[in-house]
Image: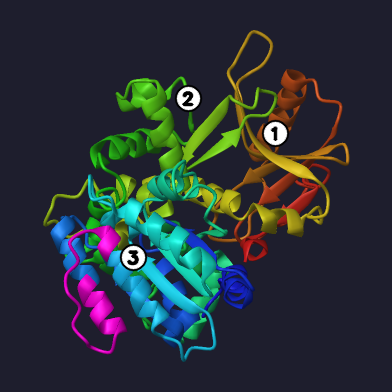
Amino acid sequence: MIGRKKEQSLLNQALNSDKPELIAIIGRRRVGKTYLVRNFFKDKIDFEMVGLKDGNLREQLTNFSFSLREANNGIPSKVPKDWLTAFDQLRLNLEAKTHLKRKKVVFIDEFPWIATNRSKFLTGFGYFWNSYASKANIVVVICGSAASWMIKKVINNKGGLHNRVTRKIVLQPFTLSETEAYFQHRKIFFDRYQILQLYMVMGGIPHYLDQVERGESATQNINRTCFHPQGLLRTEFENLFKSLFAFPEKYERLVVAFSTSWKGLSRSEIPAKSKIKDGGGLTNMLLALEQSGFITSYATFGKKAKDLVYRLTDNYSLFYLKFIQPLAQKEVGNWESLSLSQSWKSWSGYAYENICLQHLPNVKNALGISGIHSRAYSFFAKANKETKGTQIDLLIDRQDQTISLCEIKFFNDKLSLTKAQADALREKRTIFKLRTKTKKHIFVVLITTFGLIPNQHSIGLIDNALTMDDLF
């Protein structure tokens, strides 16, 4: 299995612990939750059920009986009348497996899909855990793409499942290094610039990366998967929110609103941009989007902790809204041409900035400060009478009385800093010092794709120069 070392370690600890375990795994659609569980436990799964999307109570119960028949070597099982009866049947089935010397394993996938309104599924599951599983030699794994539902209804449950989850896994997309390892495992040997281009479009979502074919360049793969009418990523966006949220159109409106501002939106700016009223409902939607991996909240340097800026950081959503959505339904796009446009050049800089933020531990490690306590911030200042306005991609405020001011630039070759670029960086540093009145020393860090060619403009200004290799 590629990557997932921490997750596999946690599952292994649960399998070998001397207590019953209830593990909740959450993560966005297509991130590989089911693959992780099936490939780790393999033939140790004693009962597996996958919820039916939009299935009613009767259909879900019938689905349960089919799953129980499979777990019972094909012996038919009567369709239970309710979930209490269903989980009692499961209890009896597991108790009959007296020959097993290991922990029994139960896997319930797409958990939120099963818990339909008024179905009392959680009541039945709570009965199963509290009356049997919590006293048995068992591991129960539950998965769901609807992260907010899983957290509210299971992890933070106030009823019969309160504090019952023993371990939680939030499954993240592959990092760049895991993406590289995944391609190599499939005998696809791209250079890192090609991988970076694919990552800008697909992120580290394994199911998307699985669409990449050997013998095609990154441009060709993007063209086939995103711009052909039958390409998986041509229509994936439409399915994302329907599979995760009860009112998908509102979440789509929020994501579209975030895509219009590269610097991100403050909480006060979101209602006007999205046409969604402020209040608790908006708070819950923002939390759900962040927990599902679509947006990320960042603290702003010098402002209160509550004054967060929200950015759209899902790589695929960013790409879709910029380049795929404008196409007519049956129009065949041409990424070979679009990838040479000025629009792509501007967008790629923002996409690369997002990837650097997603790989912040790698940035800190490359700077040699992974052992120093630090916090990452953004910085945005409007123009006033004293200074111009400015925006800083990334600030790393360090406990060693220094601040790393990071400038991120995506380029298809080594970068030679021009006088104008150097002057702009000095101006950013000056404005930041004046506006924040910081007494800390400022290190200027340049993060590029292929590196920096030192010249009279960079020497004495750039303290650290990182490349895309530092992100892998």
Kindly identify which residue carries mark 3: 222
Magenta residues, as a range?
Answer: 65-85
Spot occupied by residue 382 in the image (x, y as percentages of width and height): 58, 18
Toward the left, the furthest residue is 330
Kindly identify which residue carries mark 1: 423
Spot occupied by residue 137 in the image (x, y as percentages of width and height): 53, 75
Spot occupied by residue 142 in the image (x, y as percentages of width and height): 42, 63
Whether 386 is drawn above or below 68: the answer is above
Looking at the image, residue 216 sits to the left or right of residue 375; the answer is left
Give the mark nearest the N terminus, 3 or 2.
Answer: 3
Q: CA distance from mark 3 to mark 1?
A: 37 Å
x 69%, y 36%: residue: 425
Q: Give the secondary structure at mark 1.
A: helix
Kindly identify which residue carries mark 2: 267
Kind of residue at badge 1: Asp
Q: CA distance from mark 2 to mark 1?
A: 33 Å
Give the mark nearest the N terminus, 2 or 1.
Answer: 2
Q: Give the secondary structure at mark 2.
A: loop
Kind of residue at badge 2: Arg
Look at the image and name its color scheme: rainbow
Tell me if mark 2 has few (under 14), some (14-19) or many (20+) residues whose alpha carbon lies within 10 angstroms of its own.
Answer: some
Residue 469: quadrant of the picture = bottom right
